[in-house]
């Protein structure tokens, strides 16, 4: 139904010059949120995964529609310092705040709450970071979600299933996840990871995700630098 009307704001020209729509993003976000909420074991887990997934989708959709050419944390923070609130800044602070709130729901101790929040927000950023070619974000979500399902985490199956459902259309360059879909998948996966790990696991995941974010930001800066 979403495809019956052309909406230029929800279309993109991909790396191969083809016009594709972004409708997979909201569809994946909705499917992930519903599936994760149904699969969550406790009320706190349900609240955390819904908050993280829907916030990731909302902030990502805002960037899909309102986004500009700037990439990387430094570019958006620099614009914010100059008084301009970019769509990237909205994502950074919106998903960061939602991640911390989700972490607070999942864990009891203050440090664990913060670490869980970093894992949730960092996972959302990671899946979006790899979404540069058809299928990469969906395949990453499937790869990250499979161990969680194998370990018996029911709501890890939701992002995995949602990613698998759109993978063929994504690889076929008929649609793309966009920031809405990628952030929603990553946030849900991060919530599953945070729920399943104690402090040692949270520290390892948080360090790895922060390192990946820093490396991605460095790559963005190099790409913008004149040769």
Image (cartoon, rainbow, N blue to C red):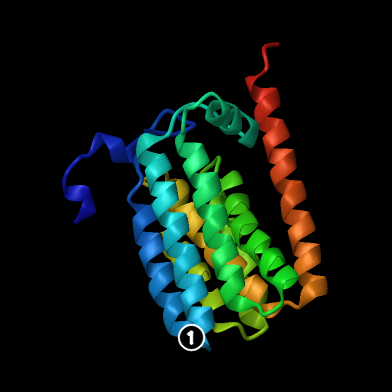
Q: Quadrant of the C terminus?
A: top right
Task: Give percent across and percent down for residue 72.
Answer: 61, 34
If the image is split into quadrants, where does the N terminus sit? bottom left
* Rendered image quadrant of residue 224: top right
**224 relative to 182 in the view: left or right:** right
Q: Residue furthest top?
A: 227
* Residue carrying label 1: 43
Q: Image point 45% across, 71% down: which residue?
A: 50
Which image quadrant for residue 165? bottom left
Q: Residue at x 63, y 86 (%)?
A: 152
Query: In the picture, residue 108 is in which quadrant?
Result: bottom right
Q: Dot 1, how many residues are within 10 Å of its Cα: few (below 14), some (14-19), or many (20+)?
A: few
Q: Is residue 82 above or below residue 123?
A: above
Looking at the picture, tell me which residue is in the foreground, 99 or 37: 99
Left or right of residue 191: residue 29: left
x then y, percent, for residue 14: 44, 34
Rendering coords of residue 135 (x, y %): 52, 50
Residue extending farthest left: 5
Give the camera-side residue of 108 and 202: 108
Instruction: Pick the residue in front: 24 or 9.
Output: 9
Residue 22 makes an appearance in the image: yes
* Residue 164 visible, this orientation: no
Q: Is residue 18 above or below residue 186?
A: above
- The picture places residue 41, in percent across and down from the top left corner, at 53, 88
Vertical position of residue 74 compared to residue 97: above or below: above
Residue in the image at 67% along x and 70% along y: 113
Residue positioned 62% across, 36% down in the render: 73
């Amino acid at each position: 139904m979403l495809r019956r009307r052309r909406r230029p704001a929800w279309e993109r020209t991909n790396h191969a010059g083809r016009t594709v729509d972004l409708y997979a993003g909201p569809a994946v976000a909705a499917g992930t949120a519903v599936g994760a909420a149904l699969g969550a074991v406790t009320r706190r887990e349900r609240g955390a995964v819904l908050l993280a997934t829907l916030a990731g989708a909302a902030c990502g959709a805002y960037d899909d529609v309102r986004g500009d050419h700037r990439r990387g944390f430094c570019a958006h923070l620099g614009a914010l310092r100059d008084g301009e609130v970019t769509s990237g800044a909205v994502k950074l602070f919106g998903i960061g705040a939602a991640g911390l709130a989700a972490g607070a729901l999942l864990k009891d101790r203050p440090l664990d709450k913060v670490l869980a929040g970093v894992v949730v927000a960092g996972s959302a950023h990671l899946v979006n970071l790899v979404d540069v070619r058809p299928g990469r974000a969906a395949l990453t979500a499937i790869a990250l979600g499979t161990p969680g399902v194998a370990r018996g985490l029911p709501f890890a199956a939701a992002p995995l299933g949602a990613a698998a459902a759109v993978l063929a259309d994504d690889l076929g360059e008929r649609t793309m996840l966009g920031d809405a879909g990628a952030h929603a998948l990553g946030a849900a996966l991060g919530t599953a990871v945070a729920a399943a790990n104690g402090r040692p696991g949270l520290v390892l995941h948080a360090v790895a995700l922060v390192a990946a974010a820093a490396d991605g930001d460095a790559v963005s800066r190099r790409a913008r630098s004149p040769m």
